[in-house]
């Protein structure tokens, strides 16, 4: 009986790990309650319920391991959004590249490496001991801030914007980009990691989805408090509670971060359900993506936060972004660094708004994103197909234009 119970607990651990990430603790708890009930019955001479429970958990664990083996040996067995959810490293689970911070939300785990996946592409992620992609430096001639475009989504480390800039100039660089974040977080990243590198130049990339990202990570109350705080004593907003670190004793966090096995299958069930609700299951290979450059409507579209009658959330997000650029400029001034701001180059109304914001905060502006857009319109492979992030060639062209703008 002792051996049976011990084996049961191991099998339950595997089955619960495969069932779900955070909610796997519920599966494990239900399994423990069922074990206690079956054991009580077994002590009265009826062992069949215990054997049946053992067999059920054995089958569940075997199924979980079989699915896990399939996902690892044949990762292409799932496609589209399901594959992204299963194989991505953009999360703060046990095998994700992030940990959570009260103010920044996702921050990179220092010294963490893994293979990344998104939209059918794989690349190697390696964060150094200081917690950013690329080699750690004691002092950086140039620091890069921004979201996934700066981080280097979809490309290897040597193909990122900062790496191409360093290769062209021979200068030391620090890539402080974090996927999915906005200038509010970029300001705090620069304050935490960049200032001590005493850079001579600071490059900040602004994306049109930064407005939405500000509202995604922060509540309106926190953004207003940040915007209204004194420029010389800025308030550091707190991210929404769901994106803050949990206490060690939180059962869901304790399970997903410390106890559960890091199994791909734990994300499969939720991904399939979301895909089914959204647009049907993705069991078959998706058609090759056709998007290789923005359409004319993408280029000529409005930037709503600066228009009369814009939604309050959009206005608030844009104000928070501009205020963050001001705080980055103040930190750059303190270290004697030049601040250059650039963007993705479209919509043109957005790019014009970023240029105006650069003037407003007293920074320089570089049209690097616009140059890449023009290259794409001339049929050069500037963007990852169906993705929108810069290719290695796109990053190289952005780096060249930033070099020109900085007078190097």
Image (cartoon, grey):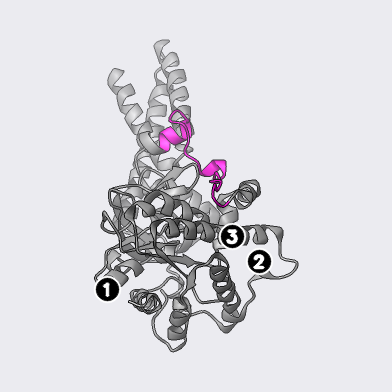
Mark 2 surroundings: few (<14), some (14-19) or many (≥20) residues within 10 A? many
Q: Tell me, for residue 169, which label it has, or none.
A: 1
Q: Dividing the image into 4 quarters, which one contains the N terminus?
A: top left
The relative height of residue 339 versus residue 126 in the rendered view (above or below) is below
- Where is residue 44 shown, x and y percent of the image? 42, 10
Local secondary structure at mark 1:
helix
Local secondary structure at mark 3:
helix
Say which residue appears at 65% left-offset and 46% top-offset. 221
Say which residue appears at 46% left-offset and 43% top-offset. 101
Quickly name the residue at label 2. 305
Q: CA distance from mark 1 to mark 2?
A: 37 Å
Of mark 3 and mark 2, the one earlier in the sequence is: 3
Which quadrant holds residue 347? bottom right
In this rendering, the count of numbered labels is: 3
On screen, residue 161 versus residue 368, left or right, reads left
Q: Nearer the viewer, mark 3 or mark 1?
A: 1
Residue 199 makes an appearance in the image: yes
The relative height of residue 14 versus residue 197 in the rendered view (above or below) is above
- Where is residue 115 shown, x and y percent of the image? 30, 57
Quickly name the residue at label 3. 212
Residue 182 makes an appearance in the image: no
Which quadrant holds residue 65? top left
Say which residue appears at 67% left-offset and 69% top-offset. 306
Magenta residues, as a range? Answer: 231-256
Q: CA distance from mark 3 to mark 1?
A: 34 Å
As for residue 332 lying within the magenta part, the answer is: no
């Amino acid at each position: 009986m002792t051996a049976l119970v011990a084996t049961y607990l191991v099998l339950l651990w595997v089955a619960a790990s495969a069932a779900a990430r955070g909610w796997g603790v519920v599966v494990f708890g239900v399994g423990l309650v069922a074990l206690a009930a079956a054991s009580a019955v077994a002590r009265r001479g009826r062992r069949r319920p215990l054997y049946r429970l053992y067999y059920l958990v054995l089958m569940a664990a075997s199924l979980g391991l079989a699915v896990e083996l399939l996902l690892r040996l044949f990762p292409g067995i799932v496609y589209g959004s399901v594959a992204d959810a299963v194989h991505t490293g953009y999360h703060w689970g046990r095998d994700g590249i992030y940990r959570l911070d009260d103010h920044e939300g996702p921050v990179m785990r220092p010294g963490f490496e893994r293979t990344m996946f998104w939209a059918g592409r794989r690349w190697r992620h390696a964060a150094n001991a200081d917690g950013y992609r690329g080699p750690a430096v004691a002092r950086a001639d140039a620091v890069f801030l921004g979201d996934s475009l700066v981080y280097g989504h979809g490309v290897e480390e040597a193909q990122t914007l900062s790496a191409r800039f360093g290769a062209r100039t021979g200068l030391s660089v620090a890539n402080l980009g974090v996927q999915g974040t906005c200038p509010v977080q970029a300001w705090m990243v620069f304050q935490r990691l960049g200032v001590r590198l005493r850079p001579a130049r600071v490059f900040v990339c602004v994306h049109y989805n930064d407005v939405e990202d500000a509202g995604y990570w922060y509540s309106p109350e926190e953004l207003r408090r940040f915007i209204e705080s004194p420029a010389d004593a800025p308030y550091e907003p707190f991210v929404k509670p769901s994106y803050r670190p949990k206490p060690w004793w939180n059962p869901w966090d304790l399970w997903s971060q410390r106890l559960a096995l890091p199994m791909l299958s734990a994300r499969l069930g939720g991904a399939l359900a979301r895909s089914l609700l959204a647009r049907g299951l993705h069991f078959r290979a998706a058609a090759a993506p056709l998007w290789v450059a923005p359409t004319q409507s993408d280029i000529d579209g409005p930037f709503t936060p600066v228009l009369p009658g814009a939604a309050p959330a959009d206005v608030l997000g844009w104000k928070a972004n501009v205020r963050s650029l001001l705080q980055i400029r103040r930190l750059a001034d303190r270290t004697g660094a030049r601040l250059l701001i650039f963007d993705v180059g479209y919509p043109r109304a957005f790019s014009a708004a970023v240029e105006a914001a650069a003037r407003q905060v007293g920074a320089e502006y570089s049209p690097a994103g616009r140059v890449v857009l023009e290259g794409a319109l001339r049929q050069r492979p500037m963007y990852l197909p169906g993705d929108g992030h810069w290719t290695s060639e796109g990053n190289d062209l952005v780096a060249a234009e930033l070099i020109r703008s900085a007078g190097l």
